Image (spheres, rainbow, N blue to C red):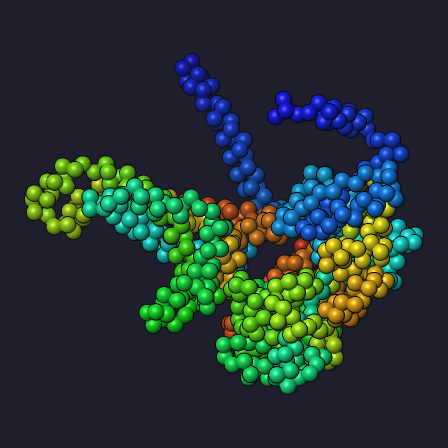
Amino acid sequence: MRASHFGWLFAAPALVIIGVFFFLPVLGALALSLTDFDLYALADLRNLRFVGLDNYWQLMHSREFWGALGNTCYFVALGVPLSVLASLLTALLVSSRLTRWPALFRTALFAPVVTTVVAVALVWRYLLHTRYGLLNWALGALGVHPLDWLGDPHWAMPAIVLFAVWKNFGYNMIILIAALQAVPEELHEAARLDGASFWQEFVRVTLPALRPTLLLVAILTAAGYFQLFAEPFVMTQGGPLQSTMSVVYLMYDQAFKWWNLGTASAVAFLLFLIVLVVTALEMRFLRRIEAP
Amino acid sequence: MPASCPPRQFLALLLALSGAGCGSASPSHRSITVWAVGREGEVIAQLLPEFTRLHPNIEVRVQQLPWSTAHQKLLTAFAADATPDLCQLGNSWIPEFAALKALEPLDERAARSAVVQPADYFQGIWDTSVVDGHLYGVPWYVDTRLLFYRRDLLRRAGFAEPPRTWAEWSRMLAAIKRQVGPERYSVLLPLNEFEPLLVLALQQPDPLLRDGGRFGNFESSGFERALRFYREAFVRGWAPPVADTQISNVWDEFGHGYYSFYISGPWNIEEFKRRLPPGEQGTWMTAPMPGPDGLGASLAGGSALVVFRRSRHKDDAWLLLEFLSTPAVQARFYDLSGDLPPRRSSWTAPQLADNVYARAFREQLERVRATPRVPELERIVTEMRLVAERVVHGDLSVEEGAGELDRTVDAILAKRRWMLARAAAAP
């Protein structure tokens, strides 16, 4: 009894901080999402109305919200596999015994992660430029007509995915390199002595050893990608035709541009629920693969 | 680093702190706080020595805000009860801050003033500061949109003078397009800017909102005509369907003849003078906006000077406001910033009267129109831009776009309707 009291005492500072700076604001936001708090309410609290689930109801019927959710899911569905694949590929290349100067490549491939989105976006906007961009110039050399990357609603999101994957794959690559180094060398040797081909070795030895790490990387990346904001904010401002409008961008607009804090809080909670469900599904799916 | 703090400065700091602690300073020495935004924040500091010479007992503290965060900072200051005495406010924000009851009505002061004379101000600009019959600010500088055009390209297409009507303008746009071919265009109307379409809409007799700002009025024949003209410019290939973030350099492209007409504001006079090579300097000019029939209206943008309601130095703030509104100071302000003055008597200064590029602006200012003064306006014009983009893209027809816009805008204005109804019901 006493010991448990002491336990609570030791945990108390952390709990208080989490309570004050996390749970209280979250509860506040939940309460806010049930009101129509806006600019008029800021002027005079008598202008505040309790609207129940009306904000959620409105969002469920808003073209804008479904559009933003669709764009975000498109980004996640395209971006996460590409990102994990790029990380895995580069991790394997960098860890290969045939690679010279692995430290140099590791650093170079990690570099995009530590750059500022805004600065890099400027460079990418030039790379993606319809008439002067390097990318279209390269495509032109292959005989492909120039693409209006950031101006065509069909190509803007793929362009953002390309940019985000390039910007983020280095982070997961480092995690995967660490995991690769943890695979016991004896397993590889044994596989080779048994006459396994390169591909068999990869599928039967390397991948199973990497599975927990891949699960972690996929979950973290998906949760992060659902919160897409900075890339479209600096590259396209959500355009063209709202094709790069993400859920977080919609929330930002509602909260800090139009001061509709009630609606913005409702968007935040919906996004939270979606990420929660997707993460749970991911865990389940990957665990099933793990333990057949 | 208190150790390296020189003793004298430290003493001054102590004195200042104790002075603040003693309550308001003596009436002979007063101080006011002024917030100014962007480039104007730098320029105002250069005008102040003259004011201090006239009023040695008033100390003016200037704080500069960047445009990108000014709006947020002002709202935060309002919530935290930390608003300045005098402030530069973009005139599209005035209805919002008036709704917050953050601004001091200035009707009486303006009526008594020998300096601020409403009749001397361009009507459309003055209107932007009047919300529900009360004056909440005095226009400081104006910002309108009109045509920048390539004289040489227009002449090559067979026209000596810039357009006066939409019909003339359409003929010119078509003729230029025929000359320059598929790779180039006649006019730049960036899809991420709401201003060009808003200008066309303001030229119509129908207001943007109806019933005292309670409902959208976009299904009116006027707005549909504006949207149809806008759409046509893209459909016929006169304007490239791009956002200006996709144009690496609007000045260079204008110089290269990528487009011959560009709807833009007064700041670009200096930019074009500075950025175009000397050989191309004679090729461009400004012209007032053409309208549906005869020269048309344009936007009344810019900034006003406002006094905050919670200020404890309103008289002193008004003194500085009057000083900044005198024609001589406004002419000097133009020299320093390139910002156009909002009153006619300031335009007689030689630097403005003799500027060939400013002439069209002087003419346009007689025909500027204020947008409806509702706090939701910025959101409404943003929705207008988004719908226009879909119309240009062919997703919606003009009629469908106007209908969609009315529905969205009516939803945005729902809270305003509720508040107006409640205010009307209250005794």
Q: Is residue A68 above or below residue B1?
A: below
Q: Is residue A280 visible?
A: no
Question: Could you say where residue B3 lies in the image, as x and y percent from the top left?
Answer: 63, 22
Q: Is residue B277 above or below residue B4?
A: below
- Residue under the point 14% across and 41% down: A188
Question: Could you say where residue B229 lies in the image, as x and y percent from the top left?
Answer: 62, 77
- Residue under the point 23% across and 46% down: A99
Toward the front, the furthest residue is B279
Nearer the observer, A225 or B11: B11
Q: Is residue B320 above or below residue B156?
A: above
Q: Quadrant of the N terminus of chain B?
A: top right
- Residue under the point 45% across and 57% down: A124
Toward the bottom, the furthest residue is B158
Question: Could you say where residue B75 lies in the image, as x and y percent from the top left?
Answer: 68, 45
Q: Is residue A112 visible?
A: yes
Does residue A188 appear to the left or right of B363 in the view shown? left
Q: Is residue A158 above or below residue B222?
A: above
Does residue B32 appear to the left or right of A184 in the view shown? right
Toward the top, the furthest residue is A2
Does residue B419 appear to the left or right of A192 in the view shown? right
